C-alpha cells in the first residue's frame, strides 16, 4: 500500500493522473492534508476531475507556513503510527506546497521511502517558501520524478545521484489535455474584447499593499485590455486589507477563485495571462497563450525557452510587456518533450519499478 499526498489546489491536477495510472494490484490511500479546504479551492476540483474522495483528511487548515507545516506533520504522524494498516511502502508527494515537505519529512522519520513528483525545479530564490519546500523534499526523497531536463542537473548539483532521477514529464498537463474538451464544451463566458486572465498569490506580489497598488495602477494604465482576476483567498484578503477595493479601475473584474473547467476554458481563449503561479506558466505554454509572469525568476525555465512565458519583475513595466506579449502570440502551441498527456503512466511505471512490482506496459521511450 502507498500513500498519495495532496492538499492544495495545484496538487489535485498532479495527483489525478497518478491515481488513474496505478495498476489495480497496487493499493493506495489518498491523503488530503486539508491545506486548502474551501469548496472552491478543494472539493470543486475533486468533482470536476472525478477524483475519488480522500481516504484520510488531516484537516490542517490555514495558518502561517510554519504552523501549517507542523500541523500536517503532527496529524500525518498519527496516521502513520496509529492506523491499523501499518506503514505504507512509499509516500508519494507532489509539487512544492507545505503538504509536500511536511509529509515527506514525517515519512522519513519512520524510514518510509518518499517519491517526489516535480522534483528538481529551482527558482534559486530562497525567499520563496516554495523553494525551501522543494530543496528539502528533494533531499529526503528516494525517487525523484522530474518534469523537465534541467531538473536533473539541479538535483545532481545538490548531491543527489542521477540514478534516483527519472524523467516522467508533466502530470498537470495530463489533466489539462484530458479536461480541455470538457472545458470547451462548458464554454465559460468571456469578455467580447481583448482580455487578460490574472492569477496572483505569491507573497512577493500580494503581501505588500504598495506593490499591490502598483499592479492595479498598471492595469488601469492598460485600458484597452479587460483584466479578469479570479483571486486566490490570500489575494482577496490582501485586497481587503489594502483599502484598494473601493477604487478598482473599470477594466478590472475581481472575482472569487474559478473552478478548473471554467479557468482552463478562459485560459485558452485569453489574449494573454498575467500570473505568478507555477502551473499557469506551464499550462499557457502548452496552450500557446502569451503569459507574463510577474516575478524576477521562474523555477520553470522551459516555459521561457520553449514556451510562451516572459518575466516582468516590475509592475510599472506591465503595460509595455503585456502589449508586446499579445502582439507576439505564437501561431502554434509549444511542444515540450514529455508534456504529452502520458506523465501519469510514466510516474506509475517508475513507482512500480521502485517497489519491484508489475506496472503499466512499456512506454516505448527511454525516460532515464
Ligand atoms: N486554477 C483554477 N482556478 C483559478 C486559478 C487557477 O482552477 O481560479 C488552476 C490552474 O489552471 C492551475 C492551478 O490552478 O492548474 C494552479 O494553482 P496555483 O496557482 O494555486 O498554484 P501554483 O501552480 O502556483 O503552485
Image (tube, rainbow, N blue to C red):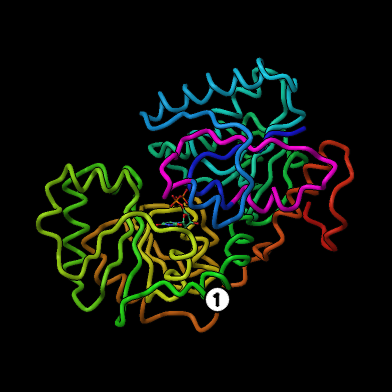
Of the 4 image quadrants, the one containing the N terminus is top right
Residue 219, position as x, y percentages in the image: 21, 66
- Lateral position of residue 61 relative to residue 90, left or right: left
Identity of the residue drawn at 54% across and 21% down: 75
Specify whether tag 1 is near ligand 1 (CB below 8 Å).
Answer: no
Residue 300 drawn above or below residue 124: below
Q: Is residue 306 above or below residue 119?
A: below
What residue did someone put label 1 on?
A: 333
Side of 256 where 97 appears, left or right:
right
User: Considering only vertical position in the picture, is 243 above or below 253?
Assistant: above
Residue for point 47% across, 22% down: 70
Classify 47 as above or below 156.
below
Task: Decide: few, some or many residues near mark 1? Use Cα within 10 Å; few <14, some 14-19, many ≥20.
Answer: some
Ligand number 1: quarter of image: bottom left
Which stretch appears magenta?
A: 14-42
How many discs mark residues in the rendered view? 1
Residue 209 lies left or right of residue 166; in this view the side is left
Horizontally, residue 8 falls left or right of residue 292, namely right
Residue 52 in the image: x percent, y percent? 64, 46
Nearer to us in this view, 120 or 212: 212
Camera-side residue of 71 and 330 = 71
Tell me which residue sits at (43%, 27%) in the image: 68
What secondary structure is found at the residue carrying circle 1? loop
In the rendered structure, does residue 112 fall within the stretch colored magenta? no
| Residue pictured at 81% horizontal, 38% vertical | 354
* Farthest top residue in view: 82
Residue 200 placement (x, y as % from top left): 34, 53
**Residue 82 spot, x, y in % from top left:** 65, 15
Amino acid at each position: 500500500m502507498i500513500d498519495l499526498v495532496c492538499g492544495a489546489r495545484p496538487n489535485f491536477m498532479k495527483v489525478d493522473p497518478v491515481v488513474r495510472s496505478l495498476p489495480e494490484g497496487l493499493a493506495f490511500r489518498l491523503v488530503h492534508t486539508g491545506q486548502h479546504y474551501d469548496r472552491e479551492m478543494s472539493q470543486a476540483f475533486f468533482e470536476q476531475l472525478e477524483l475519488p474522495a480522500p481516504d484520510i483528511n488531516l484537516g490542517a487548515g490555514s495558518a502561517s507556513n510554519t504552523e501549517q507545516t507542523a500541523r500536517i506533520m503532527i496529524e500525518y504522524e498519527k496516521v502513520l503510527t496509529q492506523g491499523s494498516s501499518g506503514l505504507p511502502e512509499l509516500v508519494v508527494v507532489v509539487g512544492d506546497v507545505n503538504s509536500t515537505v511536511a509529509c515527506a519529512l514525517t515519512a522519513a522519520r519512520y524510514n518510509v521511502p518518499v517519491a517526489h513528483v516535480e522534483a528538481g525545479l529551482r527558482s534559486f530564490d530562497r525567499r520563496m517558501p516554495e523553494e525551501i519546500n522543494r530543496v528539502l523534499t528533494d533531499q529526503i526523497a528516494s525517487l525523484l520524478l522530474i518534469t523537465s531536463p534541467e531538473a536533473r542537473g539541479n538535483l545532481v548539483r545538490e548531491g543527489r545521484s542521477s540514478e534516483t532521477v527519472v524523467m516522467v514529464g508533466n502530470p498537470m498537463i495530463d489533466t489539462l489535455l484530458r479536461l480541455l474538451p470538457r472545458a470547451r464544451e462548458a464554454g465559460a463566458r468571456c469578455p467580447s474584447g481583448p482580455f487578460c486572465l490574472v492569477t496572483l498569490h505569491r507573497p512577493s506580489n500580494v503581501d505588500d499593499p504598495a506593490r499591490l497598488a502598483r499592479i492595479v495602477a498598471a492595469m488601469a494604465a492598460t485600458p484597452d485590455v479587460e483584466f479578469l482576476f479570479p483571486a486566490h483567498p490570500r489575494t482577496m484578503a490582501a485586497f481587503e486589507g489594502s483599502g484598494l477595493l473601493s477604487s478598482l479601475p473599470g477594466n478590472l473584474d475581481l472575482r472569487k477563485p474559478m473552478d478548473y473547467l471554467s479557468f482552463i476554458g478562459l485560459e485558452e481563449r485569453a489574449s494573454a495571462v498575467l500570473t505568478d503561479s507555477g502551473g499557469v506558466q506551464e499550462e499557457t505554454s502548452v496552450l500557446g497563450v502569451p503569459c507574463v509572469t510577474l516575478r524576477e525568476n521562474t523555477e520553470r525555465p522551459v516555459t521561457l525557452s520553449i514556451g510562451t512565458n516572459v518575466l516582468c519583475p516590475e509592475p510599472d513595466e506591465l503595460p509595455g510587456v503585456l502589449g508586446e506579449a499579445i502582439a507576439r502570440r505564437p501561431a502554434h502551441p509549444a511542444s515540450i518533450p514529455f508534456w504529452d498527456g502520458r506523465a501519469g503512466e510514466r510516474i506509475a511505471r517508475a513507482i512500480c519499478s521502485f517497489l519491484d512490482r508489475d506496472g503499466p506496459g512499456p512506454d516505448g521511450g527511454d525516460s532515464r
